[in-house]
Image (tube, coloured by chain):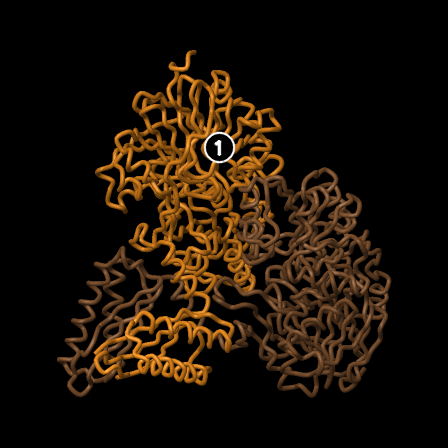
Chain colours: A brown, B orange
């Protein structure tokens, strides 16, 4: 093959590498840009007040005419949660399996953009063309049904994106990952594999989802009181197993929490959840039945302060209050960063005296393959080049180690950060520069208007609060007309520190008087005099550094 | 024994139960109050700006004349970190082993109270009297040398406090836990056991500290570049093992970070750390030696933003910058709540391209016994009554399960929260009311001046920032003299939202004008009009709720 013969293939991540969440990847084949997923991320602790984070899609906006579509691997928030924001910026078709599109549709309706968006249904056997680039799919196992991996065909070989996967040998819905198809893809030749690194640090093989079902059934069997189960709403397999356990133990099922109700509604409608017609009861019917006749399925597995379970535990839920006779199953693990809030809910339930089943007690399994499964994927695909994706950088590095173990050459494994491009021509890879990338912060209705300055201020305010110093000056006569008034919030409780604030007032008055006498006519230098003088004084007295906001009113 | 014959024994926790940290327990034998430990806790995420948290000791202040002394089980911060604050409120003698008092002395000097404090040295064989109550000790194994459990003798049997413990069969210093002595105490009769619940959720037996040494030695042996090791500064056993590995691999040792230098200095001086004289080098000598001749021992195992390791990783350390050729050993686990910051440092090190050894890779062992060890302790002591302490409430509950397993009767296990008293007379226990207890927050120099109102304000400020609305009014003429001025911090970045702030200004002006016209003479109702009107407007436009602070200046 001569140098002119192959197309240029470029692969990059707009999110999902060097972080957990907001997965979004790009595969360019000459003029075609194909996007895989458009997820959201939950904010880090230092992103104060931020609701969610989505990828920066500047590159796609600038090249909208070349973006052929967004392919969705599955319906988890970290893969579809950014979609409605992205589609407001670029209007391109979205491809996904039945359940995935079912979940997406709901989101687009909420955002008011479902009419203008083209949704195209695919399944694991679809073969489509995006621009002039053929794309096919293969089924994977994960903690939500209807997941696919993606195979983008190029003349240099396939670019394969695994999506999220594990190899579950006893899947709840009986639908195994298509290992044979993966092997065939590998046989035909894979130029580059992008593979899920989430559990690359975990030795062995991930537990089957079916084992969780057994664990849940066991708890049901030995519980004589009321049962309350919480899990990730999107884990339809697990919800199905809770339903099985409810049926087997002759309990009625009440569903609580917005996302839980939504998923159960959609998944039932689309045939992904099966249950007897008379199983479901309304939440306000629960108290009419005996405790042993009921199971409540609720949101709140991450200890979210406003979730149904947390409110039940606090005694602040309208229908359900947890009692010492209840058994609560927390069929989920804490997402990194949520450890403390999950623990807080478990502790609160213990305080009430309820029975709590959680953690290592066999009621959770990860949706991501561990080291042996990741090596299996690498061996099936036999990629020429390998990009560990979907994970923090240490997970990408751990995945790289696995790649080395199965014989991929060191120089053919690329650890990329957001925006970094790997370019393939004539079956050779090289680093190909960067495309714009980053965090877009969403706070309330604001998309991207919370930037570094706002976050820095919030951090300052959160640590030691604020002192507002207001004074009214007559600029003509250069005299203080009114003030200074000092108001503090989040600094000290005024009643306990009257003396400190009085002294602060004296200090500011002295600074003002001096400035007025010296005819300091620049408001800005007057303000910085106040800020510096007061800041020094307060730090000396309290070792704290509140934000100081001098305001000068002119009459 | 007739009802009049026994003394009244009361046991309570001022901290350490229902939480991780600030351990402080009280044992009252008639008129004698004996305190065990006086620890600190690191603030929860919602205690914004707070540096540390200590127990509320109101009860001890009110009964100072009865407090016979504070017994220290060991020198960890969660057991001694509150001491200098407590001793400023009550001046009572402090008892501890050599290393513990060595660490305490340093703290008291910093606080300027070492001269007025009586420190009394004990060892595991001491027998002392506090008031008229005999107290003896037994040696335990933990992640710092010189740990003791405490045995308070009463006529109803012993009240035993285990301190923090595991049963390490191959302790680094060769000093085993005194199992025989524990068995003898059990034989003589234990009224009540207070035992460490930290790892009550963990099956099996905790790994020996010696295994960690082997893990560290292995990494040293196969590393040809520079080595950087971080660990808890207080884990003297682990530091000793790093020293052994350094000697064995012919490396010089440089120590970085205030707490690491302090512990190594004290532990060496007191004979708890042994090293060849020429082992230590100054940090500024490191760059003069070859990488393979050096190991750097540093603070920062918890990813603390200002710690030496974090600064090295950021390229912000004065002497050391981490390079791709370095190997970093993180010989510690993340304390709950620190998971994300530890991960961030590991990720940053990977970004640089350095080798990082951490986590499951055999370079950490817990200092607390797992389930089998906790059951062993219960079987040795054979207590009549059992109080699981030292842990979150779910850990206390898990420990309770272990108590049931070894045959302690359900009604003889007490799960207590802070302040709850268990009272023993005539060998019978009952709940005995509450003593005052709670969190005392320390922020800078302020002890206890950050209360709920200040924290609530900081939380509000951290989420959506603040808008200060200032207007100068002439009260006589009821006219607006100047303003309204609106200044925002942490809400939106002004340049991006000029329109929003302009509209806010118009709204406030309208509210003011209306109030002035209607002769609203109460500043407070004028302020609440502004607050409510502006809040409603901003929520509608942004779905955010910044704090709104109206200030009216009068001329």
Residue B220 placement (x, y as % from top left):
54, 48
Q: Is residue A485 visible?
A: yes
Residues B10 and A408: in front is B10
Residue B479 placement (x, y as % from top left):
27, 83
User: Left or right of B28: which side holds A406?
Assistant: right
What secondary structure is found at the residue carrying circle 1? loop
> Which residue was labeled with disc 1?
B141
Residue B445 placement: quadrant: bottom left
When the figure is inspected, residue A490 is found, relative to residue B475, above or below; the finding is above
Residue B337 placement (x, y as % from top left):
50, 52
User: Left or right of B547: which side holds A310?
Assistant: right
User: Left or right of B163: which side holds B515?
Assistant: left
Q: Hey, which residue is sitting farthest left in the picture?
A: A517
Q: Chain of mark 1?
A: B
> In the rendered view of the protein, which quadrant contains the N terminus of chain A?
bottom right
Q: Residue at x 73, y 44 (%)?
A: A293
> In the rendered view of the protein, which quadrant contains the C terminus of chain A?
bottom left
Crowdedness near tag 1: few (<14), some (14–19) or many (≥20) residues, C-alpha within 10 Å: many
Q: Residue at x 72, y 86 (%)?
A: A31
Residue B89 placement: quadrant: top left
């Amino acid at each position: 093959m001569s140098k002119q013969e192959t197309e240029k293939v470029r692969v990059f991540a707009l999110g999902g590498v060097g972080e957990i969440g907001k997965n979004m990847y790009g595969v360019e084949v000459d003029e075609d840009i194909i996007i895989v997923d458009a997820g959201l991320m939950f904010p880090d602790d230092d992103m104060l007040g931020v609701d969610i984070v989505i990828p920066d899609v500047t590159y796609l906006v600038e090249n909208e005419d070349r973006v052929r579509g967004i392919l969705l691997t599955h319906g988890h928030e970290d893969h579809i949660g950014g979609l409605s924001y992205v589609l407001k910026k670029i209007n391109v078709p979205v491809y996904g399996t039945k359940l995935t599109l079912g979940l997406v549709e709901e989101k687009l309706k909420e955002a008011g953009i479902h009419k203008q968006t083209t949704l195209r249904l695919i399944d694991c056997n679809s073969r489509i063309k995006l621009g002039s680039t053929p794309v096919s799919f293969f089924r994977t196992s994960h903690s939500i049904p209807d997941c696919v991996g993606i195979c983008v065909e190029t003349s240099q070989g396939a670019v394969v994106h695994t999506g999220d996967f594990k190899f579950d040998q006893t899947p709840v819905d009986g639908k195994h990952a298509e290992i044979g198809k993966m092997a065939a893809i590998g046989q035909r030749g894979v130029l580059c594999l992008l593979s899920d690194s989430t559990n690359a640090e975990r030795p062995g093989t991930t537990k089957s989802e079916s084992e969780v079902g057994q664990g849940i059934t066991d708890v049901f069997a030995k519980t004589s009181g009321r049962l309350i189960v919480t899990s990730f709403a999107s884990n339809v397999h697990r919800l199905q197993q809770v339903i099985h356990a409810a049926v087997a133990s002759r309990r009625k099922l009440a569903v609580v929490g917005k996302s839980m109700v939504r998923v159960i509604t959609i998944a039932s409608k689309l045939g992904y959840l099966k249950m007897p017609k008379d199983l479901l009861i309304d939440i306000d019917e629960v108290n009419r039945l005996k405790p042993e006749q009921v199971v409540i399925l609720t949101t709140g597995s991450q200890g979210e302060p406003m979730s149904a379970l947390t409110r039940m535990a606090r005694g602040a839920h309208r229908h359900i209050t947890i009692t010492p006779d209840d058994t609560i199953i927390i069929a989920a693990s804490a997402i990194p960063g949520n450890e403390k809030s999950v623990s807080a809910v478990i502790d609160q339930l213990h305080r009430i005296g309820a029975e709590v089943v959680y953690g290592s007690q066999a009621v959770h399994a990860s949706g991501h393959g561990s080291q042996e499964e990741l090596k299996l994927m690498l061996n099936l695909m036999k990629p020429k080049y390998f990009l560990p994706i979907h994970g923090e950088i240490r997970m990408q590095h751990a995945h790289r180690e696995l790649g080395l173990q199965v014989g991929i050459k060191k120089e053919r494994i690329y650890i990329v950060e957001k925006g970094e491009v790997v370019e393939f021509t004539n079956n050779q890879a090289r680093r190909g520069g960067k495309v714009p990338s980053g965090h877009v912060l969403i706070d309330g209705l604001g998309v991207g208007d919370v930037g570094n300055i706002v976050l820095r201020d919030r951090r300052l305010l959160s640590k030691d609060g604020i002192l507002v110093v207001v004074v009214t000056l007559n600029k003509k006569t250069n005299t203080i007309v009114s003030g200074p008034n000092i108001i503090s919030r989040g600094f000290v409780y005024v009643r306990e520190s009257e003396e400190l604030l009085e002294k602060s007032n004296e200090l500011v008055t002295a600074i003002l008087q001096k400035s007025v006498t010296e005819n300091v006519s620049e408001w800005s230098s007057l303000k910085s005099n106040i800020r510096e003088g007061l800041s020094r004084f307060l730090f000396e007295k309290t070792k704290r550094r509140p934000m100081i906001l001098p305001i000068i009113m002119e009459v």
